[in-house]
Amino acid sequence: MPANRPGQDREEKRLELITAARRLFIEDGYEATPMSALAKAAGVAGNTIYWYFGDKDDVLVAVLDAVLGDAMADYQRVAAQPLEEQLLWVVDTLQQMRRLVATVHSRAARSPAVDEWHTGFHLMAESLFRSALEQAGLTGPDVDSVVKIGVFTVEGMLSHDLDEADRQAICHRLAHQWTRL
């Protein structure tokens, strides 16, 4: 049976658990990953996870925070690019995490912690869209509805198996339409 390393820093062990969960949730899916598999992947005893997290949804939220932190750091590369490039980056990044996106949507209805994370994510995504639109010159009363259309369009692209050419065409059309408003 795996054992904890004596003297290991609590935050270090927590990060190891998050890293293992991230890999498993992305590769195998949240529902297909029992806590026992997570413990085994992290090299700890099964009950050790509960020293760091209240339940599996708490692990999911920690994974989502880590993924979002990495994505936001990477977003800085494209933040000054034209709107179309930013949209493509968002879609491509989220496409790599499709399983997590689907999990968030299914778990949000059953988990207050995941629902709170999802709501916060939407607020942040809408803020980024709004900022990008304003930088592209779109202002006025239509900005809020355009932001919602953008968020829902991106979510729609993630829920359907579109090829890269289709995703590019949609992002091009959206960006072109928005910059003409």
Image (spheres, grey):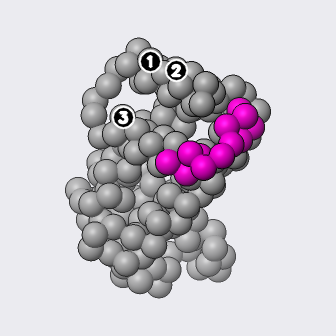
Mark 1: amino acid: Ala
| In this picture, residue 76 sits left or right of residue 146 | right
User: What residue is pinned by disc 3?
Assistant: 157
In percent of width and height, residue 14 lies at 55, 71
In percent of width and height, residue 176 lies at 56, 22
Camera-nearest residue between 154 and 14: 154
Marker disc for residue 172: 2
Callout 1 crowding tier (Cα within 10 Å): few <14, some 14–19, many ≥20: few
Vertical placement of 32 versus 97: above or below?
Answer: below
Contact between labelled residues 2 and 1, with CB atoms less than 8 Å apart:
yes
Camera-nearest residue between 62 and 33: 62
Callout 2 crowding tier (Cα within 10 Å): few <14, some 14–19, many ≥20: some
Which quarter of the figure is the N terminus placed in? bottom left
Q: Earlier in the sequence, mark 1 or mark 3?
A: 3
Which quarter of the figure is the C terminus placed in? top right
The span shown in magenta is: 134-145
In percent of width and height, residue 32 lies at 23, 56
Disc 2 is placed on an element classified as helix
